[in-house]
Image (spheres, grey):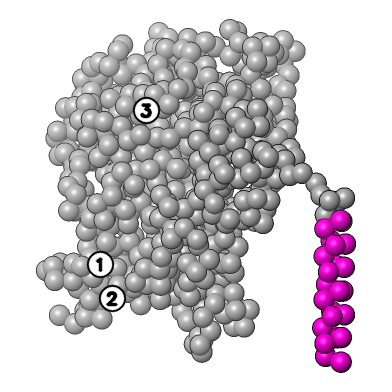
Amino acid sequence: MVTSSILVLFLLGLTAAAVLAAASKVLHVEEDPRIAEVEGCFPGANCGGCGYPGCNAAAGAIVKGEAAPEICVAGGPEIAENIAAIMGLEASFKEPKVANNICTGGSRANLLFDYEGVEDCRAEALLYGGEKSCGLGCLGLGSCVKVCGFDAIRLNEDGVPVVDMNACVSCGKCAEVCPTGAIRVSGMTMDLLHLNKIDDCLAPCMQKCPAQIDVRTYINQMKNGDMRGALLTMKERNPLPLAVGRLCPAPCETICRRNIADDGVAIHTLHRFVADWEMNSGSRVNLNCNPPSGHKVAIIGAGPAGLSAAYFLRRIGHEPVIFEKREQTGGMMKGVIPEYRLPSKVVDWEVQTILDLGVEVKNGVEFGKDITFETLERDGFEAVFIATGAWKVPALELENSKAEGVMDAVTFLEEVGKSITDLKGKKVVVIGDTNTAMDVVRSAARLDCNVTSLVGCIQRKMSANKNEVKRATELGSELLFLTKPTRFIAENGKVSGVEYIEVQYKDPKKALGDPLPVEGTEQTIDADLVVIATDRVPDMTPFTDAEGNIPFKINKKTGGIDCDKTSMQTSMPNVFVGGELHTGRSIIIQAVADGRMAARGIHHFVTEGEIPEPKNPQLRVIPESILKNMDVTYTIPRIKVPEITVEERKSTFKEEVKGSIVYEAARKEGSRCLRCGLTCYDAEAGAEYAQDSDVQKFSELGKE
């Protein structure tokens, strides 16, 4: 019985084998030999980062024409070129990408529960909702480390993943298993053009900065001696760190979380220190640029916004050309802002860094006369960014406003050192409360004259930065608050004085609205020169046709050209706008930010034909990031920056008022940074200086 059963099974097996053999001959399909050749080019990682289940499947897709030769994420350009040669194709440029961790929190954030034995981030998040009160926090169980097949990720002592940029092949596996989005894969274009999102790990300073500079990272890099890394972090958002480090009023410092405990970190000072490090070294840090894409972009105006847009467009591979009306490049940074605030050599260094990337500037070319939107389109420019600034000072419609000796602030500042070299014994009246007005006051005082400024509000309501107001008064200038000119007095066509009246708010305590004239308070003041510095507005003349029409919508609030708030695209689809032509009178960091946002919009427009709306953009400060109390251990006095004396200032235009700081002082100030996340912070910041005599524990303050 057993023997017969075995025989039956043997015959069945033999029959099945025969059938399968016959079927294989009938159904056999010869595999394209190129699949094996292509697969042989791959590094054999089988990581799946390309989207196919292994290298063989990816090779098959390439041979079928379903995938490009550069599909392999683990391979470089050489592998792509080898595959392209097999297929008789040309490999196109593929921008490399790497993983990066946006969370630096570790054990500093508030814990919601104990892990209770769970050892996988996804399971932890699924079962308990995650470790931190911050929804972006790294759970620290190392799921990303476990899935990485290239040993590119490790956990540091705080349980936070650290990515080895040289080992990472951007397969994306780590990002796939991260349940909170703490790890993301990105490339240079994405990094340079990324706009802050509410689901990013944003410190308050990053939220407040118009340019979205990663303050906590560059301060930490500087503190650890990585000056090159700190500079590159800054230049991901700001191509003009030298100028910004001197001119920015630092809104980031007012919201610094350290203010809750003592004084905010001197972010502005550290920003300048890092930027000065590069210039003082005499050599420029190398900035990577993608190969030319063939997309030409015209930029009208070589000020901060135009230079910023050109910088970002060139770095991501496009070909910007700047057209500038003046013979100098730099906008108001060159020849208007005084040397003692921003030296020409600093501007020249900064501009040259951008030109060295391959950006072309054509000086002496005026829009509306030498070039137009039509001529630029004929010349092959696919998009235009207009950033001609706000150079026009509105005239005051007062009696004798056109008398000799009445001039606008921009003209005055341009002529200082040229036609205006000595005002000794003269009486100068400056009208306005702007930063430009304070520049005029400070410059006039240096020319040995008597300066009086009529300011139509109280000091805290001035649009000028409080430090600029302080600098003006230190030179002996008189600021007459709550005063308004009513007419100019002239003799033989030349100004000789100003009549003004006192003004007051309806409710002086609240100081709301425009101050109103107080009857019976009219006075006069002698003047040899009157400088109007009440405002600066864009000049729309270059964009106005013969009938007086402007092809753009004008923002009634700013007086500038209106546009989409994130793409900077105007009502003309191929025209973008930024800087003071859009915002009206503003600060330099806003112009830099506009240039970057415009570069993002232009990039999508010329490559895709449409501009995607950013998802969850961070447009205002995130409420939960504003804390009321903090448990910080150490207090370290804020750094004091050296300055030249008031007497020295009176005699020089060339020397900067603020001096330099040394590395150890910068490092100590950097240690005050709490390395904040969205809701977490480093309570032990500054511990390395605990033994210094000027460092105290917060718990001991007031006990002495």
Residue type pointed to by label 3: Thr
Amino acid type for the residue under numbered disc 2 = Thr
Residue occupying image coordinates x 30% and y 32%: 284
**Within the magenta stretch, is there residue 605?**
no
390 or 256, which is in the foreground? 256
Task: Specify the quadrant of the image occupied by residue 457.
Answer: top left
Spot occupied by residue 392 in the image (x, y as percentages of width and height): 51, 23
Residue 546 numbered tag: none
Q: Nearer the viewer, residue 393 or 528?
A: 393
Q: Give the residue displayed 23% in from the left and 23% down from the top.
A: 447
Relative height, residue 414 to residue 172 (above, below): above
- Residue at the disc numbered 3: 353
Task: Specify the segment rendered in magenta.
Answer: 1-22
Residue 561 appears in the figure? no
Residue nearest the observer in this picture, 47 or 630: 47
Name the residue carrying label 2: 633
